[in-house]
Image (cartoon, coloured by chain):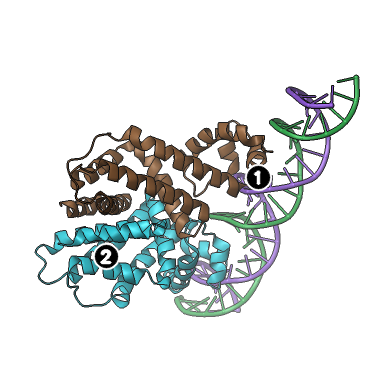
Chain colours: A cyan, B brown, C purple, D green
Amino acid sequence: MSPPRLSREILLPQLAAHVMEHGLADLSLRPLARAAGTSDRMLIYHFGNKDALVAALLDHIAAMFAGALDTAFPSGRATSRNECARTVLTITDRGEFAPFFRLWWDIVAGCAQGNEAYLAAAGAIMDRLLGWVEDHLPEADPDPAHGARRVLTAIEGAQMLRAVGRGEIGEAGLAALES
Amino acid sequence: MSPPRLSREILLPQLAAHVMEHGLADLSLRPLARAAGTSDRMLIYHFGNKDALVAALLDHIAAMFAGALDTAFPSGRATSRNECARTVLTITDRGEFAPFFRLWWDIVAGCAQGNEAYLAAAGAIMDRLLGWVEDHLPEADPDPAHGARRVLTAIEGAQMLRAVGRGEIGEAGLAALES
DNA sequence: GTCGTTATGTAGCGAGTGCTACACTTGTAG
DNA sequence: CTACAAGTGTAGCACTCGCTACATAACGAC
């Protein structure tokens, strides 16, 4: 019933790569299509309309993120909540994460506008990240579920402050995780 | 040398109101002008081009925010860091703040793209908020400057998680401020 | 071999974009 | 009264947007 499925799956990685580089905010079909070696005409053909394309893209990107987490980040456990947070902050400070964060803040902005597709993708990404943090807390952590929420909240606050050029505030703020 | 100055100052509040409601991401001159009772023609006349208009708007909005902080928030000191953060979170949960946050995440997204005007406005807003938090920490706080950074980081993390529909994570995370 | 489905290129529509050219009216300074 | 600058309306340019109409390949089923 849906033979375009195959072509969609082939296209999505290239589309995602383009979106990763240029953001979602002013995504337009023609350059996107060019980047994937096809035409706006065919994108609409495969996905129906731009909204559906973006929804599929977000889905794909959330899945990508899930897969990338364990690749980019060390697999061992941290020695403390604080160190866990600092590790994430340090690694995501590397330049190659900039495209991801450019995209991420576009997604958050979309969420704030109430866009369901964005909310679904962002929620999935945060849930995944929460799980990752929980798995990387020290064995001895007295309450990993709760600790992960503390750590994630601090990480995200620091990340936002970094995005607006106030990274020092966030880094000082991380000290809230000494326990 | 700048006779449009006056008209600009008259226009800015109405322009800001429109932007507050519709966000910055897909701002376009004609609807914006209509909302302010003028024309795209005149906006360009007064501001030169769209970028300069947006820069002026961000400047105005940052100033608005500074003024609004003490109006919307109680003026007394909190009884603890945690309570201070919870107060901000509770107040900003009220519906009338939604337009501001819609705008805010647009600004953060703009910062992540490296836009200088957005960075300046966002930085000013965060600095102002940091100062406000510091002023509202308990008298007895052992290190208000550092405490304010902890509190602000946690607040912003919680706010972002709320924006993407994971407010519970952020609220649990606030517990990191018990000290 | 014919037919129907899938896939794709070309061309274009209607709407919206930032911005400008031009003409015109004011208000003011000399 | 005149001259010049400030301000404003009308119209439009050159462009991009998402999307569609139309024609035509390619290919498998019968």
Residue C28, compared with residue B81, is above or below; it is above
Give the number of the mark in front: 2 or 1: 1
Q: Amino acid at mark 2?
A: Leu
The quadrant of the picture occupied by the N terminus of chain B is: top right
SS category of the residue bearing label 2: helix
Q: Amino acid at mark 1?
A: Gly
* Rendered location of residue B66, percent (x, y): 40, 39
Picture residue at 42% right of the left edge, 72% below the top: A96
Instruction: Please state if B93 lies on the left or on the right of C22 as rendered.
Output: left
Tell me which chain the residue with mark 1 is part of. B
Q: Are marks 2 and 1 on the same chain?
A: no
SS category of the residue bearing label 1: loop
Picture residue at 36% right of the left edge, 60% below the top: A167
Instruction: Please state if D17 lies on the left or on the right of B133 as rendered.
Output: right
Q: Residue A129: give its label.
A: 2
Badge 1 local density, few (<14 within 10 Å), some, or many (20+)?
few
Q: Residue B48: give its label.
A: 1
Picture residue at 41% right of the left edge, 56% below the top: A164
Asked whether residue B106 is in view, the answer is: no
Q: Residue A9: give its label.
A: none
Alpha carbon distance from label 2 to label 1: 45 Å
